Amino acid sequence: MKLFLFDFDGVLVESMDIYEKAVSLSLSRINKPLTRGREEFLELFEGNFYESLTKRGVDLKEFREVSSGLLAQVDYNGMQPVAAMIAVVEELQKDNILLVISSNDSQTIQTALQQFKFHGYFQEVLGSDFLLSKKDKIHYAAGKYQIATEDIYYIGDTTGDIREGRAAGVKTVGVTWGWHSKEKMAQAGPDYLFDQPKELLQLKQ
């Protein structure tokens, strides 16, 4: 049995426009606006998202209070599933354990999973309302499900995902259909780097 840990935004769903808008608006409302557009937004995910905000002088409590209200108003019509991932997730969950580990909030993720027919494949969703550090969430999952680290895979689409997965001591899987470019993901040095969702099925072997 293996433990597959999935990032949400960019890996399972195409949501960059929505998430960027929510983050940018939240930062503007607390007088910490992004001034360089998408480039600056994506830089926030080169490490842990919340640590990146802290380095910019953002009060995390204030940011989370503002952003949670905006995320509650998310228009899911502007979010789309990565269609090929539905069959991949269905296959991977056979005889394995799947979780979502994300910087997004759990309620937003749960609602989207249900809407996009991913619902029921994941044992748990560990969002920002659980812990802010993905490394800590990975450690929690490893302890709870008693899976050896060599059989745990964290699947993400940003260099921050790869760094946190590596810090947690698990296998890191970079995907190139998400938020950070293939070149950027390759530079992060994941254990695996995949261009197509179906390639994730290699991890079952």
Image: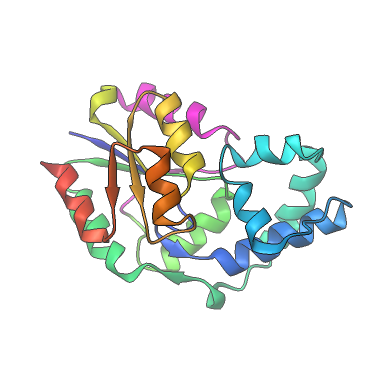
Outermost residue on the bottom side: it is 77
Foreground residue among 188 and 1: 188
x, y percentage for residue 75?
61, 73
Q: x%, y% of residue 114?
A: 42, 64
Specify whether 134 is left or right of 36.
left
140 vs 100: above or below? above
What are the residue bounds of the magenta stretch?
121-147
Residue 140 inside the magenta-drawn segment: yes
Q: Is 110 left, or right, of 69 in this rendering?
A: left
Q: Position of residue 130 (x, y in %)?
A: 57, 36
Which quadrant does the N terminus fall into? top left
Q: Is residue 147 visible?
A: no
Residue closest to the far left: 205
Depicted 149 relative to depicted 120: above or below? above
Please check the rendered image and state whether residue 14 is part of the magenta-colored stretch, yes or no: no
Left or right relative to 119: residue 19: right
